[in-house]
Image (tube, coloured by chain):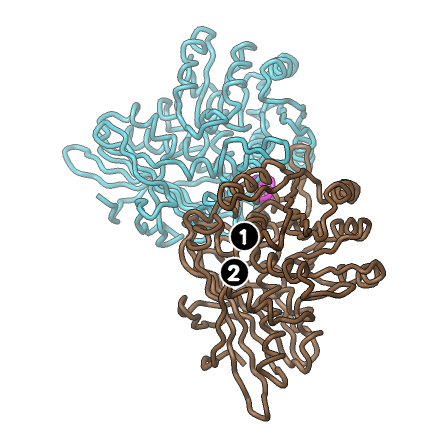
Chain colours: A cyan, B brown
Amino acid sequence: MSRVLIIGAGGVGNVVVKKCAQHPEVFTELWVASRTVSKCEAIAAEVDKLYGVKVQTAAVDADSVPELVALLNKVKPVLVINVALPYQDLTIMDACLECGINYLDTANYEPEDTAHFEYSWQWAYQDRFKEKGLMAVLGCGFDPGVTNIFCAWAQKHLYSSIETIDILDCNAGDHGHPFATNFNPEINIREVTQVVRHWQDGEWIETPPIMSDECVHFTFDYPVAGPRESYLLYHEEMESLVKHINGLKRIRFWMTFGQPYLTHLKVLENVGMTRIDEVEFEGQKIVPIRFLKALLPDPGSLGSNYTGKAVIGCVFKGEKDGKELHKYIYNVCDHAECYKEVQAQAVSYTTGVPAMIGAMMMLKGIWKGEGVFNVEQLDPDVFMDELNKNGLPWQVVDFEGKLPE
Amino acid sequence: MSRVLIIGAGGVGNVVVKKCAQHPEVFTELWVASRTVSKCEAIAAEVDKLYGVKVQTAAVDADSVPELVALLNKVKPVLVINVALPYQDLTIMDACLECGINYLDTANYEPEDTAHFEYSWQWAYQDRFKEKGLMAVLGCGFDPGVTNIFCAWAQKHLYSSIETIDILDCNAGDHGHPFATNFNPEINIREVTQVVRHWQDGEWIETPPIMSDECVHFTFDYPVAGPRESYLLYHEEMESLVKHINGLKRIRFWMTFGQPYLTHLKVLENVGMTRIDEVEFEGQKIVPIRFLKALLPDPGSLGSNYTGKAVIGCVFKGEKDGKELHKYIYNVCDHAECYKEVQAQAVSYTTGVPAMIGAMMMLKGIWKGEGVFNVEQLDPDVFMDELNKNGLPWQVVDFEGKLPE
């Protein structure tokens, strides 16, 4: 019997619960918990209607280790899938350790008061998970997650050595709002306003943030979506990939942004609405970016009118049997089709499906180990097959385009 | 003895107090009061240093009639100059009526919860001021204020009948911030986001607001400042001018905006930051535009680095002795010179100086009457002379440019 507890009932939580419910032979009992239990109940009602699967629900404040421990001791799952806020990764890991439960998440921990995406906090749990004989799988969404697995698969099957990786993330969708973020605005805006870094010849190179006139960008011709302006951005999977892909000389991450999105972001930064520190207002302390989040459309609500494609993949340059080889592995995901299947847009879908597959790998014992793992450290083969079977088909092609030097 | 109480210690309050202090023979005793008494004390300290004039200070909540009445009974001024928030016009008028004190303001009343600029609320005080033998002078800043007086003066001296008036307000200044408003952001943003109206052939014509792609604008070649894109806007002085300028067929108001200002405004509106209703946030009720105000630069702080000119005036078309006549009366005001004189930018300066002159007209008995008056109902001649003597020199020229039909 495999009882799994999903923590988080936002856009991604909705996808994870529904995709797990599609595999009742693997996920024999499902729980979903979040601060707002009504959101869990709404998902459970839909799952019952769609698949005839009963999902149990609970309220939990994921900032509180004692509350989490009480819930874990009550539910006794074999695995926690954490799709709550990245601020809450450590409290949930602490509770899993205390209760002897395996762990999987989709985004690395960051502290609330600094925009600082780093694995160091979670890697520091390595010995504790090892000692308890537990497995923690970090960053098992799309990027990080599937992009790391594309790298692991390319290293295993295509290359004798990989020299450069360019991860390219294109959302060519249209949600019909003048400005909205595809996932939690607070996390999204922190991510895209930070100083950009990429890795080259053993060190991190800093370049200006994407709202700066001096930022690095170029036009990439995406499959299906066509040519799109793509901006150099720091993204967390690079931090683990530089450790785990042998011989790597350079890794970069690119994301597409439309000019209106950048204009909105720049204005919001100019007026101070992206600030993450507290501002005195009418005798209260308010964090501007949180108030902005309260005004913006709920990312979970974007799905119903979302059209267009998300195209995410990796371009590799490397060598096989003494020959230079350029390959591109990618997935194309359609917003409207995602909504039809699980009432979510593609950004939630591409994050939630890999979390379900990662959990399936753990429950089936295909992924096993003691300690803390990034997904590229685990065998990619079955995971890659499951992507094709669960709505995220991928392709591998010869890459004939051009990337900036 | 002429004891005057100024209520409001923002950018305009600072100018009014200093300009009054330059005429100790007229303003023999000065008081300044505001919610935050430290702002009054800072102005008083500067006035002492600049002019050796002692200004007395007090704290008052101008939303509270009892607090205002207590202050007026203590200070016993002959006149209150109200440069507080437009929401507070009625409470201050109520207190003046109760205590038998004359009244002058620079901006008409608007309720807090709807963006609605109209004189009707204040005109409704006509009988009460008359019965008490008191005088209330409304809208004695630059626009409304000086622009109305330009109209009265043109009617008295230049024209037998005025057919059209175009008021043109150009701020060609640069304050060095990506986005800031020249006066209270809450009032400023309400004003510029409202539906546009102008008056033609006896009725108000509505056109789209300035952030709309369909808004009405044209390029006007301003004296000194040069050609600037000017947008049709509703402005409060039109409401009284259509009543008081005989035979008027059309009146319009135009204001210059730069593209970056409009872009910022559009984004802030898109994300909901210009909303004036309450939003639930972390268990509190927050009015977004107020929170935005807390983030933006204090308009009073813009002066020190402000450069460039403000150019405001009226273009008239009409007839004198059977001949068609086109005249333009305007003032050019330099931001940096204003700052040098009274540590304020030109927008505060052009509002504060006319308030002082209007008060001077009342104290000298040049403007007298019982009831509520708009400034174009009073004799313009001495006021026009005082503008030249007090830092706002004006010119009248033949107008040879072109205006939209």
> What's the magenta region?
A293-301
Chain of the residue under label 1 = B
Q: Quadrant of the C terminus of chain B?
A: bottom right
Q: Nearer the viewer, residue A175 or B126?
A: B126
Q: Position of residue A354 (x, y in %)?
A: 47, 32
Q: Nearer the viewer, mark 1 or mark 2?
A: 1
A99 to A115, vertically: above or below? above
Left or right: B250 in relation to B312: right
Which mark is on residue B137? none
- Name the residue beneath numbered marker 2: B390
Q: Position of residue A129 (x, y in %)?
A: 45, 11
Left or right: A276 in relation to B7: left
Mark 1 surroundings: few (<14), some (14-19) or many (≥20) residues within 10 A = some
Quadrant of residue A295 within the rendered picture:
top right
Chain of the residue under label 2 = B
Secondary structure of the magenta portion, mostly?
helix
Residues at marks 1 and 2 touching, judged by CB atoms closer than 8 Å: yes
